[in-house]
């Protein structure tokens, strides 16, 4: 997901997607610990997407203040 795509979404959509990504990151960590993780690059992708969403949400909340 690119930053442009994140900025086009509403705060509610971003919050929902953030929750989904955090659940996915949790599941990926379990798969990695048990040796079942096949796509190791997905861990980095999910972490970066979470960071992008949090950054945009923080920018919007600080701009509103």
Image (cartoon, helix red, strand yellow):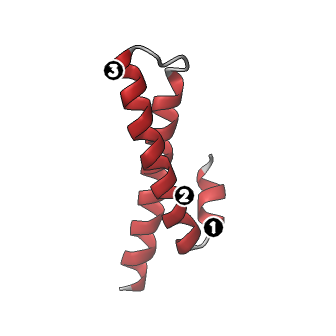
Which residue is label 2 attached to?
17
Who is closer to the viewer here, 52 or 21? 21
- Residue contact between numbered discs 2 and 1, judged by CB atoms under 8 Å: yes
Q: Residue at x 42, y 59 (%)?
A: 55
Task: Return the x and y of residue 42 as percentages of the image width and height.
Answer: 53, 29
- 54 up-or-down from 59: above or below: above
Q: Residue at x 51, y 52 (%)?
A: 20
Indicate which label's residue lies in the foreground, 3 or 1.
3
Report which quarter residue 13 is drawn in. bottom right
**Mark number displayed over residue 33:** 3
The CA span between labels 2 and 3 is: 24 Å
Residue at disc 1, secondary structure: loop
Q: Is residue 5 left or right of residue 25?
A: right
Of label 3 and label 1, which has the lower sequence position?
Answer: 1
Which residue is label 1 attached to?
9
The CA span between labels 2 and 1 is: 10 Å
Q: Residues within 10 Å of mark 2 (few under 14, many from 20)?
A: some
Indicate which label's residue lies in the foreground, 2 or 3.
3
């Amino acid at each position: 997901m690119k930053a442009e795509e994140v900025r086009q979404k509403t705060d509610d959509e971003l919050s929902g997607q953030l929750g989904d990504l955090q659940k996915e990151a949790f599941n990926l960590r379990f798969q990695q610990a048990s040796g079942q993780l096949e796509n190791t690059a997905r861990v980095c992708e999910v972490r970066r997407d979470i960071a992008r969403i949090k950054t945009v949400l923080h920018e919007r909340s600080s701009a509103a203040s």
